[in-house]
Amino acid sequence: MKNKEKSRGSRLRIRVKSRAGMELVQVALLIALAVALGLIFKTEITDFVNKTFDGLSGFN
């Protein structure tokens, strides 16, 4: 009986660690995707920000 309980407990710990590891991988992939998109569209983002701030400074 104790062996079954130990087995269940260790399986549960492995599942919890596995889920936490998967969440870490997902976050890392999302960050990598955001950085890649930022590098690809760097000039467009820069132009947009500059135009936006130029437009805002015109209201003064």
Image (cartoon, rainbow, N blue to C red):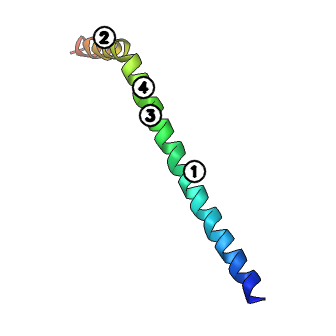
| Circles 4, 3 touching at the beta carbon (< 8 Å) | yes
The residue beneath circle 1 is 22
The three-letter amino acid code for the residue at tag 4 is Ala
Q: Secondary structure at mark 1?
A: helix
Of pointers 2 and 4, the one earlier in the residue sequence: 4
Q: Secondary structure at mark 4?
A: helix
The three-letter amino acid code for the residue at tag 2 is Lys
Which residue occupies 54% across, 54% down?
21
Percent position of residue 51, x then y: 30, 11
Camera-nearest residue between 49 and 33: 33
Image position of 11 with respect to 36: above or below: below
Q: Which mark is residue 4?
A: none
The residue beneath circle 2 is 51
CA distance for labels 2 and 3 = 27 Å
CA distance for labels 4 and 3 = 6 Å
Of pointers 1 and 4, the one earlier in the residue sequence: 1
Task: Report crowding for label 4: few under 14, some 14 to 19, many 20 or more residues within 10 A (C-alpha).
Answer: few
Left-right relation of 20 to 43: right
Of pointers 2 and 1, the one earlier in the residue sequence: 1
The residue beneath circle 4 is 36
Nearer the viewer's eye, disc 2 or disc 1? 1
| Circles 2, 4 touching at the beta carbon (< 8 Å) | no
Of pointers 3 and 1, the one earlier in the residue sequence: 1
Camera-nearest residue between 11 and 42: 11
CA distance for labels 1 and 4 = 21 Å
The three-letter amino acid code for the residue at tag 3 is Ala
Which residue occupies 44% across, 23% down?
37
Percent position of residue 5, x then y: 73, 82
The residue beneath circle 3 is 32
